Image (cartoon, rainbow, N blue to C red):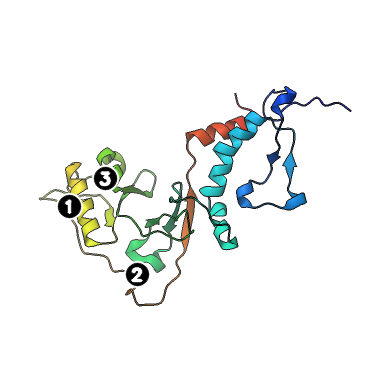
Amino acid sequence: MSSYKICIYCPQTDPDRFRGVEHVIPQGFGRFGSETPTLDCVCDDCNTYFGRELDLLLTRDTYEGISRYSRGQVSSEERSQKRLSLTLADPAEAGDFVGLRVAVDGTTGQLMPPAAQFHAHNFKTGEDEVYFLRQIPYMTLPEADYGKPGTKSENGTWRCKILAPSREAHDEMVEALQRAGIDFRPGTPFQNPWGSASSQPRSFLVEIASEVDKPHKRAIAKILGVR
C-alpha cells in the first residue's frame, strides 16, 4: 500500500495538504453520523475553495438550500437569500401581477414583502426584464429591443409596468424613472390578486431562479478541469 495521493481537482501531491476530508454532501444540508459520505482525495486548498465558492451557494441561495427550513435546520444568517428569487408565473392566478419577484428571508425561509419593481418587455428575447429601485439609474432600454416610448402626441410601443407594495413605493419608482430620463406615466391601477388583508392565504404557482455569479463560474470551471 502507498500513502501517495494526488488531488482529483488539481495536481497537488504534498501529503501535508491532505489534512482534512471533503464532505460530498455539504454539511449545511445535514450530517449523517458514521454514514456521512466523505473523500480523502481532495487537497485542503481545493476543499476550502469549493466550500467557500460552491457549498455556500448551494446551502444558502438555492431552493434546495431553502428547503432546510422545512427540516428545522434554521440558518444563523440575518440576511436575505440574495441570489434566489421566486416569480409569480401563472397569469390566470396572478393577473396583472404576473412576473412579480419576491426574495426569501435568510433566517426563516419565508417570503419577504415584495419590493417596488419596474418591468420592461424585451421584444428581442420575448421576456419581461425586472429592475429594482437601485438599478434604475444604470438602466438602458434601446428602442431596437424594447420599443419606442410614447410622447404627448402619440402612443409608444413600450410594454412596461410598475409593481409596488404601496402608493409611496410606486411614486418613488416613478420619480426614479423620470430622473433617469424615462417619462413613465402611470395608467390604471392593477387589482390586488390577494384580496383583502383579512382574507384567507392563497397559493400561487411560482418559478424559482438562482443566480450564479463569476466566482462560482470559476469554481465550476475548476471542477471541469478548465485551466
Q: Amino acid at mark 2?
A: Pro
Q: Which residue is mark 2?
A: 193
Q: Which residue is mark 1?
A: 155
> Residue 91's spot in the image, x, y percent?
39, 64
The local crowd at label 1, few if under 14, some if 14 to 19, many if 20 or more residues have their Cα within 10 Å, is few
In the rendered structure, which disc, 3 or 2, sits on the residue that comes first in sequence? 3
Q: Which numbered disc, 3 or 2, marks the residue closer to the eye?
A: 2
Q: Residue at x 20, y 49 (%)?
A: 156
In the rendered structure, which disc, 1 or 3, sits on the residue that comes first in sequence? 3
Q: Nearer the viewer, residue 49 or 138?
A: 49
Q: Amino acid at mark 1?
A: Asn
The local crowd at label 2, few if under 14, some if 14 to 19, many if 20 or more residues have their Cα within 10 Å, is few
Q: Nearer the viewer, residue 170 or 73?
A: 73
Left or right placement of residue 85 versus residue 177 in this view = right
In the rendered structure, which disc, 2 or 1, sits on the residue that comes first in sequence? 1
> Residue 198's spot in the image, x, y percent?
34, 77
Q: Quadrant location of residue 22?
A: top right
As displayed, is residue 40 above or below residue 183? above
